[in-house]
Image: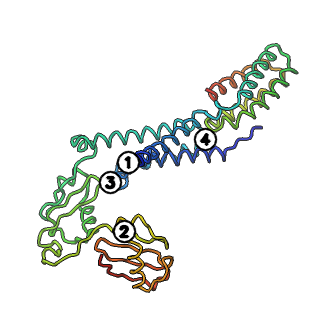
Amino acid sequence: MQANNIGNKIIRYMIPLLVLVVFVVIMQGGIYKLGSQDNKNKVYHYKSLLASNIEAEKWTNASADLDELEVRWNKLIPRLEYHAEMNAITGIDVSLGRLKGFIAAHDKGGALAELGEINKYLDNLTE
Amino acid sequence: MIVLNEGLVVLARSLIAFFSLLIFARVIGKQQISELTFFDYVLGITIGSIAASLSVDLSSRAWPHWIGLLTWTATVLILQLITLKSRLATNYLLGEPSVVIMDGQIMEEALRRIRYTASDILEQLRDKGIFDLKQVAFGVIETNGKLSVLLKPEFLPVTPQDMNLPTQPNGLGTELIYDGVIIEENLQKSKVDRKWLRKELNKNNIKHISDVFLAYLDGAGNLYLDLYKDQARRENNAGK
């Protein structure tokens, strides 16, 4: 009887505690952090490739890298959006759009500035 | 073009807000509702507002809102613990009851201190069915803003004790049948059994337990029966 009471008490306290822990994990980016590393790594990989191609003014390669980066980024969003600010996610989307324009115009300064902004957003989102 | 699952995110965040609020409200306890002071009222609105932001404000992360919710709850809990331990802290943090009527006279100074008007007091008196201030021996404004009144002895209602009338013992009632189902646990608590219950139902021409919506045994041993067919409502002294 007493053991039953203790068991009930543990369940009574453990369930809400467990629920709160799950909430903390979700809000602290658990879905993103526990998710597959592939897309995360690919986003950073294509971002650095893109940076080197812009620096070297290889615009055709840069355009291809940007397309790949966009594909990887879109796959990453569903894992990020449960803990991240929507404004930051849409901010990256807008920057990618502008970057496309700068690459098409072969504007190195503008492209690097957009890339810098994307870096800041990504740091904030994935920290 | 990115596709954001805003609906799904709001759903997830709303569930987090809802269950966090439920857990935190349970931690704060019943004091919130039963002793709602002005501060408690504002507190409730603030905590609710933070939970609402946590649920639908996608312009910021859920985490800072949740921490806000946690901080407010933890602070309330700490204050509750302090006020439980220290009477001095209770008086300082929650205030003290103020005597505003004494021997039928309004205490103007006390009213000024708590920023109450005479019409507020009269309104609260009328709410309690007291229309003549002279009937009041003491009137006290409690910390939750409600007026407690002690009438002068000559205006107090007569009780059975005053009249030396015998009374039946009362106590907490127990539901024995709810929605056509016997609650075995309550039968045991009330020290009656199914056989006794059947007999009582038979006395009232009730053939099936499933016909009974509510069977309730009060502290004096009276069985109250409410059937699904409402004309058959009856009361029977079970005489335990």
* Foreground tag (1 vs 3): 1
Q: How dense is the environment of label 3, judged by Cα within 10 Å: few (below 14), some, or many (20 and up)?
A: some
The picture places residue A107, in percent across and down from the top left corner, at: 80, 20
| Both labels 1 and 3 in a single chain | no
Query: In screen coordinates, is B130 left or right of B2?
Result: left
The picture places residue A1, in percent across and down from the top left corner, at: 39, 50
- Give the camera-side residue of B21 and B42: B21
Query: In screen coordinates, is A31 left or right of B141?
Result: right
Kindly state the secondary structure of the residue where label 3 is placed. Answer: loop
| Both labels 4 and 2 in a single chain | yes
Image height check: is A2 above or below B210? above
Residue occupied by mark 3: B35
Residue occupied by mark 2: B174
Q: What residue type is labelled 4?
A: Leu
Q: Which amino acid does label 2 sit on?
A: Thr
Q: How dense is the environment of label 1, judged by Cα within 10 Å: few (below 14), some, or many (20 and up)?
A: few
Residue occupied by mark 4: B58
